[in-house]
Amino acid sequence: MSEFKADDFVMPRTEGGVSLCHSCRKNNLCRLGVTTEQVADDGRIEFDVECPPFYEAGPGVAHGGWTAEVMDETTGRVPLDGHGQMTVTGTLSVRYIKPVAIGLQLKAAAWLDRVEGKKWFVLGELRVASTSEVLASATGIMIAREPAAHFGEFKKWLGDQESDRPAAI
């Protein structure tokens, strides 16, 4: 099992300002198709997004799982990039309004609704860039965590699982 290091919690950014998760930093590219990220003074975050072709579910249409993943990624950036608080997704509800076309230029936005203790309530939308038509919206509850404790607890939990667990995480 790989060990967590201090720099695992540093989110490198692309030239477009996109924070890269642990998986995406390997290629210095967001695999979801997020190309720019801009944080406003009020913590609202806006993104340029385009669904990559390998998420195609039907002819020219993005898989709904891609839409949910983008909404999770963008709403999750509000506490971290907008306010400096690491969180994990507690719940996420996605409303699918219109199909998302592969290769269409999109805009996503996410913002903070409120904070109650460790719970960060966030909202988000995915729109067509040229017309602003809403394709999906999301509401989420992100749970504040301290990185070392969070990943340490995960490592301990994983160690308690059956022996058929993956050799390296």
Image (cartoon, helix red, strand yellow):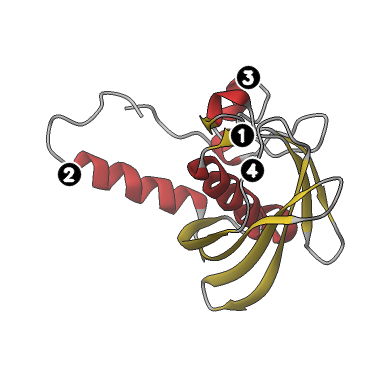
Residue identifier under label 3: 27
Look at the numbered discs 4 and 1 and tell me whether their residues touch, using CB distance below 8 Å: no
Give the number of the mark in front: 2 or 1: 1
Local secondary structure at mark 4: loop
**Disc 1 versus disc 3: nearer the observer:** 1
| Horizontal arrangement in the rendering, residue 148 relative to residue 120 (left or right) | left
x, y (%) of residue 34? 70, 37
Q: Nearer the viewer, mark 3 or mark 4?
A: 4
> Which percent across, then down, holds residue 25?
62, 27
| Residue occupying image coordinates x 61% and y 34% | 32
Q: Nearer the viewer, residue 89 or 22?
A: 89
Percent across and percent down for residue 140 are 54, 65
Residue named by callout 2:
160
Instruction: Find numbered disc 2 in the image and state the secondary structure of the residue it sits on.
Output: loop
- Residue denoted by label 1: 32
Q: Mark 1: which amino acid?
A: Leu
Q: How many other residues sit within 10 Å of disc 4, few (<14), some (14-19) or many (≥20)?
A: many
Q: Residue at x 14, y 29 (%)?
A: 164
Q: Position of residue 28 (x, y in %)?
A: 68, 23
Q: Which of the 4 image quadrants contains residue 167? A: top left
Q: Which residue is mark 4?
A: 100
Q: Say whether disc 4 or disc 1 marks the residue closer to the N-terminus.
A: 1
